[in-house]
Image (spheres, helix red, strand yellow):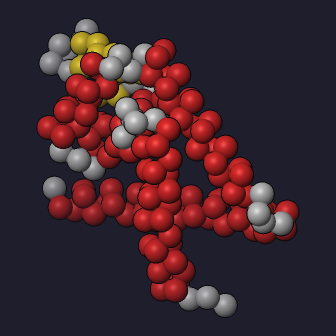
C-alpha cells in the first residue's frame, strides 16, 4: 500500500514532464500557439469569458492576460465583444479560425499520446484510465482547496 506523501511526490514529479512533452509538441508543430495561448483557447472552447475570468483561471495578472489576448485577437483566433448590460466589460470568444486551430492542436497532441499508449498492454491501459480519473478528482479537490484558501485571504 502506498502512502499519500509518496503518491503526491509521484504526481508532482510527473507534471513537469507532461508540461515539457506537451509544450515541445505545441512548439514544434504549432509555432504560433504557445502553451499559455493553448490554455486560454482551451478555456474559451468551453464558452465565452472575460479577461478577468481567464486571468483567474490561468492564475496570472490581468495585464499579462490582456497581452496574450491582444496577440490572439491580432491573429484572428479570439473575438472581443463589449457587453450590452455593462459596457466596461468585454467578453472573449473563439473565432471559427481559433476553434479550428485548437481542434487541430488537440488532434495532434491526442495522436502523439495514442502512439505512445501503443507500448502498453490493455490491462495497463485500463489501470492508467482509472488512475487518470482519480487524478482528475484530486485536481478538482485541489481547485476547491485553492478557492477556500483564497476566500480566507480576501
Residue sitting at x 44%, y 22%: 98
Instruction: Please name the residue shown 41% across and 57% down the image.
Output: 143
Say whether residue 140 is visible.
no
Of 75 and 41, nearer the camera is 75
Residue 4 percent coordinates (x, y):
52, 84
Q: Position of residue 13 (x, y in %)?
A: 46, 74
- Along the viewing direction, whichever of 137 and 127 lies nearer the viewer: 127
Image quarter of residue 1: bottom right
Give the residue drawn at x 37%, y 32%. Answer: 32
For this orientation, the residue located farthest to the top is 84
Instruction: Determine whether, in the image, residue 9 is placed left or right of residue 62.
Output: right
Q: Can residue 61 be seen in the rendering of this structure?
A: yes
Decide if residue 67 is on the left or right side of residue 76: left
- In this rendering, the count of numbered labels is 0
Q: Residue furthest right?
A: 122
Q: Is residue 18 above or below residue 85?
A: below
> Could you say which quadrant of the image residue 39 lies in?
top left
Q: Is residue 62 left or right of residue 29?
A: left
Task: Locate the C terminus and report the quarter of the image it occupies.
Answer: bottom left
Residue 78 versus residue 36 in the image, above or below? above
Q: Residue at x 52, y 65 (%)?
A: 138
Direction from residue 54 to residue 111 in the image, left or right = right
Residue 124: x %, y % from top left? 78, 68
Q: Residue 15's x, y, as percent?
A: 46, 65
Amino acid at each position: 500500500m502506498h502512502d499519500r506523501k509518496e503518491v503526491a511526490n509521484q504526481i508532482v514529479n510527473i507534471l513537469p514532464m507532461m508540461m515539457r512533452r506537451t509544450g515541445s509538441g505545441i512548439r514544434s508543430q504549432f509555432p504560433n500557439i504557445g502553451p499559455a495561448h493553448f490554455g486560454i483557447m482551451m478555456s474559451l472552447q468551453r464558452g465565452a469569458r472575460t479577461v478577468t475570468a481567464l486571468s483567474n483561471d490561468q492564475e496570472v495578472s490581468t495585464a499579462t492576460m490582456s497581452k496574450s489576448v491582444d496577440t490572439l485577437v491580432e491573429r484572428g483566433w479570439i473575438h472581443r465583444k463589449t457587453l450590452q448590460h455593462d459596457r466596461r466589460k468585454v467578453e472573449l470568444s473563439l473565432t471559427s479560425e481559433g476553434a479550428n486551430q485548437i481542434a487541430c492542436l488537440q488532434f495532434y497532441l491526442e495522436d502523439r499520446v495514442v502512439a505512445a499508449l501503443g507500448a502498453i498492454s490493455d490491462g495497463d491501459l485500463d489501470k492508467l484510465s482509472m488512475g487518470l480519473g482519480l487524478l482528475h478528482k484530486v485536481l478538482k479537490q485541489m481547485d476547491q482547496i485553492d478557492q477556500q484558501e483564497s476566500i480566507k485571504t480576501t
